[in-house]
Every structure is written in C-alpha cells, then in structure tokens.
Amino acid sequence: MGYFNYDGKIYKNGTDLISINSRGLRFGDGLFETMKSSNNIFQFADDHFERLWKGMNVLQFKIPVHLTAKGLQQQIQELLNRNGHNSIARIRLTVFRGDGGLYDNINHLPHYLIQTWPLPDDTGKWLSNGLLLGIYNDVKKSCDILSNHKHNNFLPYAMAALHAKKQKWNDAILLNNQGRICDTTVANIFLIKENVIYTPSLGEGCIAGVMRKNLLQQFSKDKLPFVEGEITIENLEDADEVFLSNSIHNIRWVQSVGDKKYDNKYTQKIFSSFHSTIS
C-alpha cells in the first residue's frame, strides 16, 4: 500500500479527498511539476520550484507565507521515505484551486498533492535504442501566457499521447498554432544540423523545461553553438540528429520521425558532457 500527501497530511493511496466541486477537476485550474530524486537528492529542485512559483503567480494564486519551497521539499522527502522510494523516484507535485464555479467569489489559496513512484535504475542513462516519433496534427499548441507552464489543462499533450500509442510511437511531436515544431508530449525537442543545435524558443509555445534550461546553460559554458527560434517541419526533416530532454530521462536520442532516420554521434557527446555534471 502506497501513500500520498494532500495539503501536508499523508494518506493511503485510494483515499477519496478531492471535492466534486473542485476547480482543479472542473477546469484544470492548477499546475504541476514532475521531478526526479536520486538517492534522496532532488535534481534541479531550485529550478522546479522557481517555475512553479512563477506559474502560481501567472494563475493568480494567493500564496500563503507558510507555503515554501523548503517546506514542500521536506514533505516530499517524508513521502519518499514512507513509500520506500529512496533510490530513483519520480515525484509529481500538483497545485490547484479549491471549490467553485467560474465566477464564484472563492479564495485563491492553493491546495497541493504530492505523489511518488519508483523508477528503474537505468533511468537517465544513455538509451542505446533511439526513440520512434511521429507528428501529431489534430490539436495545435497555443502561444500565450500559459504556454510555457505545466498547467493542469494538458489536453493537447494527452490527446497526442493517445495518438502516439495507437501509432506505436514512443512519443509524438506537437505543433504550435503556426504549424511549427513546439515540443513533444513529455519533452522539449532539439535538432542538430552541421554541429549547430536548434530548439524552439519559448515564444513558440513550448514548455519552459527545467532540463532544457540547464542544457542551454551548459551549451553556453561549453561554447557549443545553439539557436533558439522557429523550427519548421522542413527543418526537422533536414536535421542530422534529433534528441529530447526532460527531467526524468535527461537526454534521449531520436532514431526516426516517420520515415526520416537520424544519427546520434553528436548527441552522444552532448549526453556524456552533460551527464558528467549531474552524476
């Protein structure tokens, strides 16, 4: 029997707590962070909580003084210990508003839910078999003040993931409302062409990924040429290599998108250099 944390108290999995009038349930009115813990050390914790706090401000939450990043980390650690997830674990922290309709005079204090799951020991290691991807066209990602945040209205990604599963892809690429490359259901996307690294800018509607942020910082330190900007489907088809990044798997190379095949030599070098900084 596993456990979860709801508003600072630990409950057994299966305990019913969320109200049927929850704005989080009704409208997706909230945010979430997915983090990784390795041997009880949170990776890039400051970046995750900085993004969460920015998102809560954008969504106009009233953040109480007692709700702090340090306090939440302590509660996450307690839950990891209770669940016995002390090796490598995935952590999901969900923040959402309470009960109410769209125009009700409600308070804007955040409720929160913490969950943890064990991860395989090889999570984050180099993937010898590349990912098989495709492009999802049915729903486009908007470019607005919410686009860079991991808000709970995650339908474009959920629908793309369902499509990927039907197509037997490992992941699906989402396009923005201009028809350009945005990100994938679970990761930011990078292209390599003639040893220059390209990734969609935040203005293109992609999630402001924590791993993406740290990779770009590492590219600057290593003096690797990179460009944040607009990426078209034609750019994707013309690329030499493609890889994905997120906080759970770090870097994973893409073997193919549709019929297009990619190499991974430069991606392996990037992986080795970056992995040495977080090991």
Image (cartoon, rainbow, N blue to C red):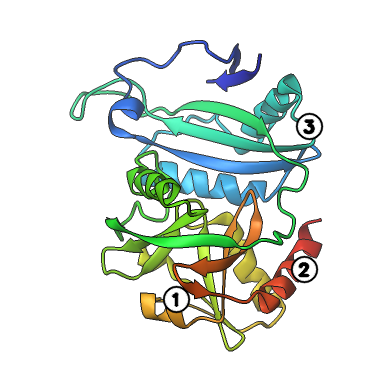
Residue 185 placed where, x, y %?
45, 52
Q: Which residue has dot 1 on it?
A: 236
Looking at the rendered structure, the secondary structure element under dot 1 is: helix
Q: Amino acid at mark 1?
A: Leu
Question: Residue 4 appears at what percent x and percent y?
Answer: 59, 20
Q: Earlier in the sequence, mark 2 or mark 1?
A: 1
Answer yes or no: do the residues labelled 2 and 3 have beta carbons within 8 Å? no
- Residue 31 image offset from top left, x and y in percent: 43, 39
Q: Nearer the viewer, residue 129 or 252?
A: 129
Name the kind of residue labelled 2 in the image.
Ser
Q: Residues within 10 Å of mark 1 (few under 14, many from 20)?
A: many
Instruction: State left or right for residue 138 relative to residue 57.
Output: left
Q: Nearer the viewer, mark 1 or mark 3?
A: 1
Determine the residue positioned at 65% across, 52% down. 249
- Compared with residue 46, is residue 141 higher up or lower down, i.e. above or below? below
Residue at x 51%, y 10% (from the top left corner): 15
Q: Is residue 64 visible?
A: yes
Q: Residues within 10 Å of mark 3 (few under 14, many from 20)?
A: some
Mark carried by residue 272? 2
Q: Specify which label sits upstream in the sequence, 2 or 3.
A: 3
Residue bearing the label numbered 3: 86
Q: Quadrant of the C terminus?
A: bottom right
Q: Amino acid at mark 3?
A: Asn
